[in-house]
Image (cartoon, grey):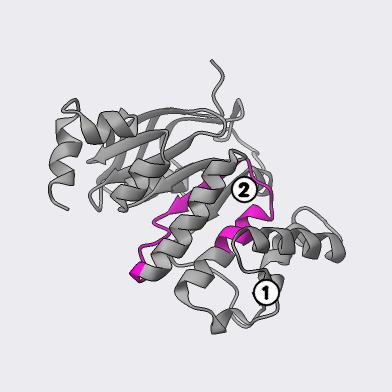
Amino acid sequence: MSYLVEVQNLQKQFNEKVVLQDINLKIKDKEIVTIIGHSGSGKSTLLRCLNLLERPDTGVILVDNENILKPNVSLSELRTKVGMVFQSFNLFSGRTILENCCLAPMKVLKLKRSEAEARALEKLKEVDLEDFANYQVDLLSGGQKQRVAIARALCMKPQILLLDEPTSALDPDSSQEVLKILKKLSDNKKITLIIVTHEMRFAKKISHTICFMEKGLIVEKGTPQEIFETNKFPKSKAFFEEF
């Protein structure tokens, strides 16, 4: 079987602290994977390694059969394939939504402004914000900012979208807006999603595969039914009982 992402024996430490130890993971094209676990278990670091925002110390990461850890890999090309949405939005303050969505396609993909704007409006429509295109980012709610961040990432037409706690900074209503958009993305089956989240009901609803991390390891991995509805995985079961 062919996999879009393969992680082999991945390790990462910061000074003396081991954050990832011997991570192995295979993800198919269009698969929806959620990564759950306690804070500090290595979830976000693993996600950041997948597009080299953090460089692992040892191991192999294959994306579309290419080892992204080999020398001279183009970061701009990699991040065109592997987009990322951060919990803190990381939008450009003082610019409009449309400008935020057009900058990378124009600079990295060399699209003409008219092409970039057409693509941006298409992606803003997908996140229900096409009527806000000319609004300043600073005027938006947290939920709207996160939806803009998703649209901006989609404007690069990535094969894979990484989402690091996309609802952690949001109130419950805004969280539901964002989760609704991600569910719609997953239903369209056009992109691979790898999501770090504490939203357990959402993970159960959206995922093909759920990975439970503990102390820098993926200690349990299975379908939502296996993780949530059987006694096959005692560590994740104990984790759920804390919620």
Give the amino acid type for the residue marked by disc 2 in the picture: Arg
Crowding around mark 2 (Cα neighbors within 10 Å: few <14, some 14 to 19, many 20+) is many
Give the residue type at disc 1. Asp
- Label disc, if present, on residue 131 of the rendered structure: 1
Instruction: For residue 170, say whether it is visible.
Output: no
Residue 194 visible in the current orientation: yes
> Hey, which residue is sitting farthest top in the picture?
1
Is 130 displayed left or right of 127 in the figure? Answer: right
Relative to 49, say whether 117 is above or below.
below
Residue 57: image location, x then y, percent: 41, 38
Q: CA distance from mark 1 to mark 2?
A: 28 Å
Magenta span: 149-172
Where residue 173 sits, quadrant-wise, is bottom left
Residue pictured at 47% horizontal, 61% vertical:
178
Instruction: Answer few, some or many: residues within 10 Å of disc 1's Cα (few below 14, many 20 plus, some between 14 and 19).
Output: few
Observer-nearest of 10 and 145: 145
The picture places residue 211, in percent across and down from the top left corner, at 33, 36
Position of residue 237 measured from the top left corner of the image (x, y, whole percent) = 16, 38
Residue 161 on the magenta span: yes
| SS for dot 1 | helix
Which one is in front, 183 or 80? 183
The residue beneath circle 2 is 79
Residue 153 part of the magenta segment = yes
- Total residue callouts: 2
Residue 73: name its quadrant.
Answer: top right
Residue 219 spot, x, y in % from top left: 25, 31
What number is the disc on residue 118? none
Displayed quadrant of residue 101 = bottom right
> Given contact means CB atoms under 8 Å apart, are the residues at marks 1 and 2 in contact?
no
For the point 77% across and 53% down, the residue is: 109
Residue at 13% in and 46% down = 241
